[in-house]
Image: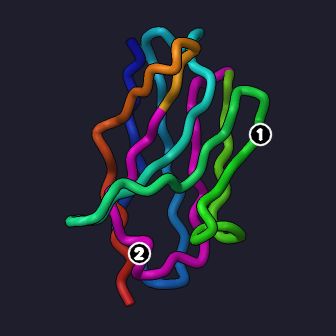
Amino acid sequence: QVQLVESGGGLVQAGGSLRLSCAASGSIFRINTMGWDRQTPGNQRELVATITTGGSTNYADSVKGRFTISRDNAKNTVYLQMNSLKPEDTAVYYCNAEDLSLRHFWGQGTQVTVSS
């Protein structure tokens, strides 16, 4: 099992920045890809960004050029730097991890609210 704990959410004005962190514990040696999803009420969960153990990244078109995902394997932590935030980025952001058996794990979520 893998446990994920997010931090760093909050309220920010449009154009501002936030940095989310996600610390992994448990069977961390089995973790391959980590990333972030987000969800707003009434909508499906949306993939925001992913990063592999080797550092390959993938982003949703809606955040390319504004968000940067990074990973510190020594600290078992993944980060999401969010710049130029827009009101439509308002959502609950969930950290996720995929292990070598292709099982997925999610954190409890952290709220990001961007005011206009």
Give how far across and how far down residue 25 sits, in percent: 45, 17
Helix, strand or loop status at disc 2: strand
Circle 2 residue: 12
Helix, strand or loop status at disc 1: loop
Marked residue nearer the N-terminal end (1 or 2): 2
Q: Quadrant of residue 50?
A: top right
Mark 2 neighbour density, 10 Å: few (under 14) some (14–19) many (20 or more): some
Judge by depth and name the residue closer to the eye, 8 or 47: 47
Quarter of the image with the C terminus is bottom left
- Identity, as a three-letter code, of the amino acid under mark 2: Val
Judge by depth and name the residue closer to the eye, 81 or 96: 96
Circle 1 residue: 56
Give how far across and how far down residue 4 sits, in percent: 40, 29
Which residue is rendered at x = 38% and y = 22% of the image? Answer: 3
Give how far across and how far down residue 28 sits, in percent: 53, 14
Stretch in magenta: 74-96
Name the colouring of the figure.
rainbow
CA gap, disc 1 and disc 2: 29 Å
Q: Compared with residue 1, is residue 72 higher up or lower down, i.e. above or below?
A: below
Q: Is residue 77 magenta?
A: yes
Q: Quadrant of residue 63?
A: bottom right
Which residue is rendered at x = 21% and y = 66% of the image? Answer: 42
